[in-house]
Amino acid sequence: MKHWMRTLGALALTLGFVLAGCQKGPDKAAENATTAGELKVGFVYTSPVGEAGYSWAQDQGRKAIEKLGVKTEFVESVKEGADAERVIENMARSGDQIIFATSFGFMDPTMKVAKDYPNVKFMHCSGFKSAENVDNYFGRIYQARYLTGMVAGLMTKTNILGYVAAFPIPEVIRGINAFTLGARSVNPKAQVRVVWTKTWFDPALEKDAAISLLDVNADVIAQHQDSAGPQEAAAQRGKYCIGYNSDMSKFAPKAHLTAAVWNWAPLYESIVKEVREGAWKGGRSIWWGMDKGVVDIAPYGPMVPKDVQDKVNAQKALFKKGEDKVFVGPIKDQAGQIKFAAGVKAEDKDLLGMTWFVDGVVGSVQ
């Protein structure tokens, strides 16, 4: 009997070592592969890649680094929460050395998985948490939002601009505020009416939200959504629209004025280079703007007059030079209270934690 107990104990001990090796193996493999310059990179998307929109734009960045000899994989339409944690952990376990978690709601799952895989580099998009092996990153898309707001402010006839918005988080609120500031810089009478959908990708619901704004006399529809539903609604009513994430003109060619668009390739290529050279550092917040080529606006629609284009392009040229004065006071909130005094420029921490609307926005931040 004791002989069998000793035998079982030995087997259990051996099995324990094997399981421990299985748990740590992928992470150690990731470290060794990174050192050797053989990179495998994973991407987690919150919506379908499709033909346009946020995940499509992210996927263009993935394709760009494949040209650098990087092996990539992606999973699309991942729900935030437990599903995201499962997908991220599977990528880390399978040997991905860099994992791009591309949605705000992937932040906590990323941080949780990162603790168990210290040799994997995690890049979380649009969040604010970081660690020794986690960077958060985003682009100053509010610069492009400001420019599209200028276009909308100059093109509107009713002075009512509609904005179909996803979730009331700082990223989205900041974009609405920048759009409003841009519109009112050229048209002080313009107001921006906001409808929340509480979705990232739901074409039918987002289209219905746009219709509700068109019903209150909005004649330009902007959006922070992944689908082209709002674009289609505006086109069907004979009104104008402004896209987001990518050029959406093909969905509403007679209505699409321009769009705030992403170009993730420069940032992703830079991260790959850092990892290969051993220069990557965790704990950072990376926030590139138009001067780095990460954000831009789509080509103007044929209905946008040259004088409008010239005004917007003049401001765009300043952004490309690194001159960013979008959030420079005097700036008031909806209640008329001064948030930034004359000449005062908002710090990044103010922008990253923005939970209030500027004067000119009609709607609630809830």
Image (cartoon, helix red, strand yellow):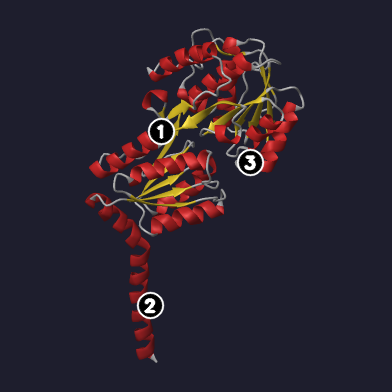
Q: Quadrant of residue 276?
A: top left
Question: Of tags 2 and 3, which is closer to the observer?
Answer: 3
**Apparent side of residue 152 relative to residue 59 in the rendered image (left or right):** right
**Apparent side of residue 311 relative to residue 96 in the rendered image (left or right):** right
Q: Nearer the viewer, residue 185 or 116?
A: 185
**Apparent side of residue 83 relative to residue 313 in the rendered image (left or right):** right
The type of residue carrying mark 1 is Ser
Q: Nearer the viewer, residue 337 or 233?
A: 233
* Label whose residue precedes the other's in the sequence (2 or 3): 2
Please provide percent x and percent y for residue 310.
Answer: 49, 12
Residue at the disc numbered 1 = 285
Residue at the disc numbered 2 = 12
Question: Of tags 1 and 2, which is closer to the observer?
Answer: 1
Q: Which residue extends farthest right?
A: 215
Q: Nearer the viewer, residue 228 or 103?
A: 228
Q: Secondary structure at mark 3?
A: loop
Residue for point 49% across, 25% down: 299
The image's mark for residue 199 is: 3
Rounded to the nearest angstrom, the CA distance separating label 1 from label 2 is: 45 Å
The type of residue carrying mark 3 is Thr
Rounded to the nearest angstrom, the CA distance separating label 1 from label 3 is: 26 Å
Please provide percent x and percent y for residue 114.
Answer: 41, 49
Quarter of the image where the C terminus is located: top right
262 is higher (above) or lower (below) than 39: above
Residue 131 seen in this snapshot: no
Q: Quadrant of residue 269?
A: top left
